[in-house]
Image: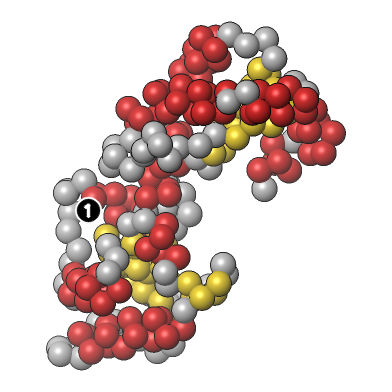
Amino acid sequence: MTKSTDKAYKATKRIKQGKASIAAPFNELAAWISKRWDVTVLNIIYDRRNKLHAPRLHVILESHDDAKSFERSAYCYDKRKQIAVASRFLNLIGRQPSEYDVDGLFVVFSAFAPIALQEADSRVSDQEVGDLKQRIDNPDLWEISRCFGHVTFFFYTDAQARDYAASGKMAEYARRYFEILKPHDEFDYLSEDEFKVAFDSKQNFDENYQSSSFYYYR
């Protein structure tokens, strides 16, 4: 689950909105995981075997920190926790005849909140961003750029970006962007104290990224 158009995200969003619930036996598994590791599990999805992967349990946790607690490193899950979750699932479905293929069952973990925040930012219109730029009315500000929930204020030169950061403008601009973003925060994940923006320059964008958003944000 990496973007708001993913089926897993949409299904979990309905649960978070109170429009759906986790079906058995996944509700029991979710409660067990939540209690054992003191995390919030919003959904668990079983994916059948296909050409790309073995049968899979997708555990969707609420926060980034919750999901990180199931990782051993940035690109590797904690195998002990994977085995524990898989074993518990096998125990649950072993109580009755099962429709699930569990040969080679693989457990993955992801977080809901970061994608919800990306979706919130995607709902901020270009018009709202343009109006904000006009209200800021800074001739040194080239562009307000957004990608994957990250907001960057681009000035024309490196020196301008450094000077405005040193003058405390970053906190002010973060607050002003937060004001147009917060109304789109459906699940109240955003905190003004924690919301950050970045400062950069068109000079850096042009000279080091070939004026390409693809290279800059990849």
| In this picture, residue 131 sits left or right of residue 87 | right
Q: Position of residue 127 (x, y in %)?
A: 48, 16
**To which quarter of the image does residue 190 belong?**
top left
Above or below 188: residue 97? below
Q: Residue at x 69, y 31 (%)?
A: 200
| In this picture, residue 67 sits left or right of residue 162 | left
Q: Looking at this view, is 115 or 157 the one in front?
A: 157
For numbered disc 1, what is the local secondary structure?
Answer: helix
Q: Residue at x 42, y 69 (%)?
A: 69
Residue farthest along the front direction in this orientation: 167
Q: Looking at this view, is 7 or 135 the one in front?
A: 135
Residue 105 visible (yes or no)? no
**To which quarter of the image does residue 74 belong?**
bottom right
| In this picture, residue 71 sits left or right of residue 189 | right
Above or below 45: residue 181? above
Tag 1: residue type? Ile
Count the labels in the image: 1
Q: Residue at x 17, y 59 (%)?
A: 21
Q: Position of residue 129 (x, y in %)?
A: 51, 20
Residue 201 visible (yes or no)? yes
Q: Position of residue 60 (x, y in %)?
A: 34, 63
| Image coloring type | secondary structure
Image quadrant containing the N terminus: bottom left
Q: Residues within 10 Å of mark 1 (few under 14, many from 20)?
A: some
The residue wearing badge 1 is: 15
Q: Residue at x 37, y 69 (%)?
A: 58
Q: Position of residue 187 (x, y in %)?
A: 28, 42
Above or below 103: residue 70? above
